[in-house]
Image (tube, rainbow, N blue to C red):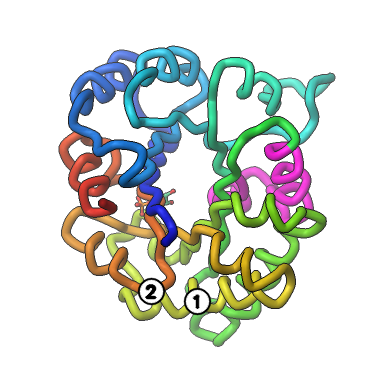
């Protein structure tokens, strides 16, 4: 039985006081880590403080990106060593917004996934198609390519620990959710790809989230699908009440 993982991706939102207040507001109300994993993916400036505030609670703190090198002349970048040093435990890699606006590629995602494991961070690897690709029936092929490249060179054990987030780009922040059947169909395809290129055990263990306009009103139906093991949520994770409802649904 795969444990569900509900991750709130705040993207570039909230000032410090709002970020801290969110943890205050959810304190004591988030279900235990044994029931569901709950993660907040926060902007870099608050990570250290949020890790400290979340200590002793079931909430884990994630970064939204990182560089693959440990250190060096990479102005403006943040390394896995730095994230690990301040107690971050998860990192989102290859989000479609990084791919679209910041030239993230399948190759850099793969380097980052390796770097994450090297430094004890759990990668949440995002994949997903555009509307144009869906309409021209390229979804499975496109997502398959992204998954294969992202996982290239990992050990079976590392693949088992990886979280893959299937996020159709046309459903992100648009209010258009993929139907639970559409979402599950692609998640099943991803699991089959993992089975083909790694192993049946890895496919059974890997967690696959759905992301794209997930909210309290649709999360239960999505999580009830056979191959959806959680959600990566943007807009609906910004308010404490809404985030708590999402996490509750993961129990
Ligand atoms: O990382 C989260 C996804 O991009 C989904 O965002 P959304 O829930 O606002 O559609």
Residue drawn 54% across and 31% down? 89
In the image, which residues are magenta?
93-117
Q: Earlier in the sequence, mark 2 or mark 1?
A: 1
Residue drawn 49% across and 33% down? 62
Answer few, some or many: residues within 10 Å of disc 2's Cα (few below 14, many 20 plus, some between 14 and 19).
Answer: few
* Residue sitting farthest toward the bottom: 137
Q: Image quadrant for the N terminus?
A: bottom left
The prevailing secondary structure element of the residues shown in magenta is helix
Residue drawn 31% across and 46% down? 35
Which mark's residue is nearer the viewer, 2 or 1?
A: 2
Q: What secondary structure is found at the residue carrying circle 1?
A: helix
Camera-side residue of 32 and 117: 32
- Mark 2 close to ligand 1, CB under 8 Å: no
Residue drawn 18% across and 46% down? 245
Answer few, some or many: residues within 10 Å of disc 1's Cα (few below 14, many 20 plus, some between 14 and 19).
Answer: some
Residue located beneath label 1 in the image: 188
Q: Is residue 234 visible?
A: no
Q: Is residue 56 left or right of residue 240?
A: right
| CB contact under 8 Å: marks 2 and 1 | yes
Give how far across and how far down residue 199 sits, in percent: 69, 70
Camera-side residue of 176 and 80: 80
Toward which corner of the image does residue 32 lie, by quadrant?
top left
Toward which corner of the image does residue 23 lie, by quadrant?
top left
Cα distance in 3D space between marks 2 and 1: 8 Å
Q: Is residue 211 visible?
A: yes
Give how far across and how far down residue 91 sits, in percent: 56, 38
Give how far across and how far down residue 144 sits, in percent: 65, 73
Looking at the picture, does residue 217 appear above or below residue 158? below
Q: Is residue 103 magenta?
A: yes
Residue located beneath label 2 in the image: 226
């Amino acid at each position: 039985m795969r444990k569900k993982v509900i991750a709130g991706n705040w993207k570039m939102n909230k000032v410090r006081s709002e970020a801290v207040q969110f943890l205050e507001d959810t304190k004591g109300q988030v279900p235990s880590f044994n029931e569901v994993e709950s993660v907040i993916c926060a902007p870099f400036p608050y990570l250290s403080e949020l890790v400290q505030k979340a200590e002793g609670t079931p909430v884990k703190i994630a970064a939204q990106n990182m560089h693959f090198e440990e250190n060096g002349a990479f102005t403006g970048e943040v390394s896995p060593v730095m994230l690990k040093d301040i107690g971050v435990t998860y990192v989102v890699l290859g989000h479609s917004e990084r791919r679209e606006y910041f030239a993230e590629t399948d190759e850099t995602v793969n380097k980052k996934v390796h770097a994450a494991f090297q430094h004890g961070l759990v990668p949440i690897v995002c994949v997903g198609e555009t509307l144009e690709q869906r309409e021209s029936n390229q979804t499975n092929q496109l997502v398959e390519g992204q998954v294969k490249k992202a996982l290239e060179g990992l050990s079976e054990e590392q693949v088992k620990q990886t979280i893959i987030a299937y996020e159709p780009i046309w459903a992100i922040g648009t209010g258009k959710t993929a139907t639970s059947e559409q979402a599950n169909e692609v998640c099943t395809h991803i699991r089959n790809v993992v089975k083909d290129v790694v192993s049946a055990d890895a496919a059974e263990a890997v967690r696959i989230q759905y992301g794209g306009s997930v909210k309290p009103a649709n999360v239960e139906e999505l999580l009830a699908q056979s191959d959806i093991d959680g959600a990566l949520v943007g807009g609906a994770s910004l308010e404490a009440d809404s985030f708590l409802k999402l996490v509750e649904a993961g129990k």
